[in-house]
Image (cartoon, helix red, strand yellow):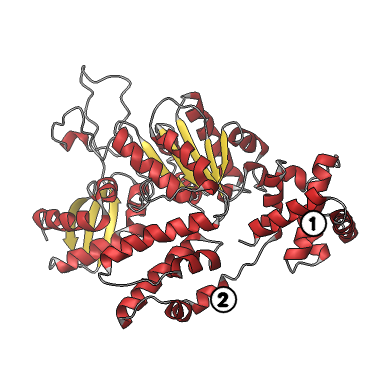
Amino acid sequence: MTNENWVQVREELRKRVGKNNYTNWIEPLEFSALKNGVARFSVPTSFFGDWVSRNFSDQILQHLLRAGAEVERIEFATAPVTRPQKSAAQPASAHPASPATGTAEQDAPERGPAERPATEEEVPGAPLDRRFTFDSFVVGKPNELAHAAARRVAEGGPVTFNPLFLYGGVGLGKTHLMHAIAHELQLRRPDLRVLYLSAEQFMYRFVQALREKQVMDFKSLFRSVDVLMVDDVQFIAGKESTQEEFFHTFNALVDQNKQIVISADRAPSEIKGLEERIRSRLQCGLIVDLHPTDYELRLGILQQKAEFYHSQYKGLVIAPGVLEFLAHRISTNVRVLEGALTRLFAFASLVGREISMDLTQDCLADILRASDRKLTVEEIQRKVAEHYNVRLSDLIGPKRVRTIARPRQIAMYLSKALTSRSLPDIGRRFGGRDHTTIMHGVKKIEELMATDSQLSDDLQMLKRALQG
């Protein structure tokens, strides 16, 4: 195998992994040698090599074999690099070429001012999904504020709120919006250094930096970005050393007026094991809740997805009412909803039948059974807190003022009426209250329903919203 062969393989990989992944992860690889069935590549940093090994080595190996190379496995090693001397014209404020960001500028051809060598200026992060753009994000009432805030950040203008904190349950669009922000920033502001990764990957890199005595490289990498995006930040809760480094990274970027975008499955105040100073920092920006999807939003998502599949499965007919049926029955998770439609179109195509209601129920029987609405106490608490405009932490906390105590009793009543949880179990979810307290709350609401028409209307409205 020669360098010419590797150039050909790289072109094939470009088509397979997409432009962003190719620029960040494949292009910086340098073929070193092929010996005894082992293909060796030089990489800018050990962080970089480890990430490529875990995420792209199988694809690289497959394409090398297709090109006729006798390869059994792939190895990545950090090559020693000699730094070039800075010229007098090079500004002192230029980003330093450290091992954490890659150093290969001495071998790079001259570039125009709009071009940036990927090994120096591009900050490696988690691969972005090309499907997750603003164009493919269906906006509805439950997510319109989150979408608007994400759009504002993606404009790349002056930082107006920092951080932007997106939170919500599984499959509601947090990761989609974060990928969309990164994609849009790459188009609008290619001069910005954007780093997207999960909190787990942040911790992994930090631990590896400690182990390999590269902590300064780690700090240099994360504190030199213009936009830092961390997904699923609840993962670092309880991990003291990682929280310490995250806190200092957060402060360093905020002090430089650099944008931070964070996502989690719950609000900062509800993440157990998160240090108070981090919780306070996260709460100083804009916190946006992605609410569970409503029927109209789910239907819109299905309609958009169906249009895409119609272009792939020519001539395939979907009967009236099928999308409406799915939007009503699968109400908890957008990923499950989209997966169900994918399976439905694939099955109908294979058997050559119209997507009728009967075929839908037969093909998706297991998903429909699993998706039968199973309310949780936490969902009820969130919906009641939202309806009465009180904080969730107050709803389950010790405060006894009437404006909080009444919504709390309503949430207790709905938890008893709409879930199969026992009274002691419900009590534990209301700040560790005794089951007799739950019984008193339920009885109080039952008594008030007979005389308070406004309360009865509120309860009916809440039940409809919770039961989809």
Camera-side residue of 385 and 265:
385
- At 38% from the left and 31% from the top, the residue drawn is 156
Q: Quadrant of residue 55?
A: bottom left
Q: Identify the disc placed on residue 440.
A: none
Across and down, in percent, residue 342 comes to 38, 68
Q: Is residue 430 visible?
A: no
Q: Is residue 374 visible?
A: yes
Question: Does 441 sit left or right of 327 as displayed?
Answer: right
Camera-side residue of 214 and 56:
56
Relative to 306, residue 100 above or below? above
Camera-side residue of 273 and 167:
167
Q: Amino acid at mark 2?
A: Arg
Across and down, in percent, residue 446 comes to 86, 58
Question: Does 275 sit left or right of 84 as displayed?
Answer: right
- At 85% from the left and 39% from the top, the residue drawn is 401
**Local secondary structure at mark 2:** helix
Q: For mark 1, what is the residue?
A: 412
- At 21% from the left and 53% from the top, the residue drawn is 14
Q: Are marks 2 and 1 in contact (CB under 8 Å)?
A: no
Q: For mark 2, what is the residue?
A: 369
Across and down, in percent, residue 331 comes to 55, 63
Image quadrant holding the N terminus, namely bottom left
Image quadrant holding the C terminus, namely bottom right
Q: Amino acid at mark 1?
A: Met
Relative to 54, residue 148 above or below? above
Question: Badge 1, how many Cα within 10 Å: few under 14, some, many 20+?
Answer: many
